[in-house]
Image (spheres, rainbow, N blue to C red):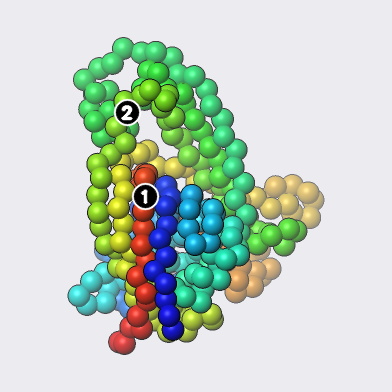
Amino acid sequence: MFFKQPVYYFSALYQLHLVKSETARAFIPKDFRLVEAFGYTLGGFFLANYEDSPAGIFDELVIIAGIVWNSPTSCAWAARVLVNSDDACVHGRKDVGLPSQVAKFSKVRKITALPKTTKSRFDSFLNMIGMANSPDSANSCMDVRVSEGNGQAAKDICSINLGTTVPQPDSNRWIGPVIKISLPSFSGHTEYNPHLLKYSCQIECRVRAVPPAKISRPFVLDVDGKKSSERNSSEMDSGDDKRNLSISIMLSKPILALEFSCLKMKVDAPTVVKL
């Protein structure tokens, strides 16, 4: 099959979480060994806004179950990929072997002015690593609500609260160094692509550490019209089980958050993994 190497331009938040091994194993093929310690693995999520791509402009949430090992390397395994683009969903499923689903991303931004304060030495250090609030900046809080599916059949996955700082146009705020990395990834083993695949992403971007985003669970209305964050397990089908496990990954403990900007990514053609 001919594979045209797609090029993407976007910004993203990559957040690492401590995920229970038993949760991660529900998504990872038995052929792979989970990289774990003390009952936990490294999972989390990748939230991206694509400004230019073969599929146009779209949003993406990749929920990462954990890290798997296949000698001589280890890679992250995606539990769920949610995109608000039909073209991106089809490409992810058929060409890259990802568990892609069409989703809805609802965004609400609130901006409030920050009072001017006297800088300390610690503030200067935070500014060096890109985590300080500039006195000429505004406090920006964005809520991103992600729902799987469209219309009345859509089911909420989570709400992601991005508490960031928006510099003014003339701000000299540091946005991180330019880095170039190659990220190998495993995928496949889905109903759309049964093969186990390996592919690589060539990335060039700026990166800096940021405070972790706050994740809240979705709410559903019970029979009395009251909000509830849980459903009876007897009412869930297998699709609900995987969805709820994906939500538990999002709600697990964050340990590191990285902001990627000015990001350019090329995706190599996937190859079949023979174990």
Give the label on residue 212, or none. Answer: none
Give how far across and how far down residue 236 sits, in percent: 65, 69
Q: Position of residue 138 (x, y in %)?
A: 46, 23
User: Would you say the residues marked 1 and 2 are in contact, meaning their CB atoms lie under 8 Å apart?
Assistant: no
Q: Is residue 198 left or right of residue 71?
A: right
- Asked whether residue 159 is in view, the answer is yes
The residue type indicated by label 2 comes to: Arg
Q: Is residue 107 left or right of residue 188?
A: right
Measuring 73% from the left and 52% from the top, which residue is drawn there?
221
Alpha-carbon span between mark 1 and mark 2: 18 Å
Amino acid at pointer 1: Leu
Query: How would you rate the neighbour count of disc 1 (Cα within 10 Å): few for under 14, some for 14-19, many for 20 or more?
Result: many
Residue found 52% across the figure and 45% down from its top: 160
User: Where is the N terminus found, in terms of image quarters?
Assistant: bottom left
Residue 215 percent coordinates (x, y): 50, 46
Residue 168 screen position, x and y as percent: 42, 24
Please name the residue that numbered disc 1 is placed on: 263
Specify whether 84 is left or right of 176.
right
Secondary structure type for disc 2: loop
Front one among 141 and 96:
96
Q: Which residue is mark 2?
A: 173
Q: Nearer the viewer, residue 8 or 11?
A: 8
**In the foreground, 96 or 68:** 96
Q: Residue at x 56, y 30 (%)?
A: 110
Q: Secondary structure at mark 1?
A: strand
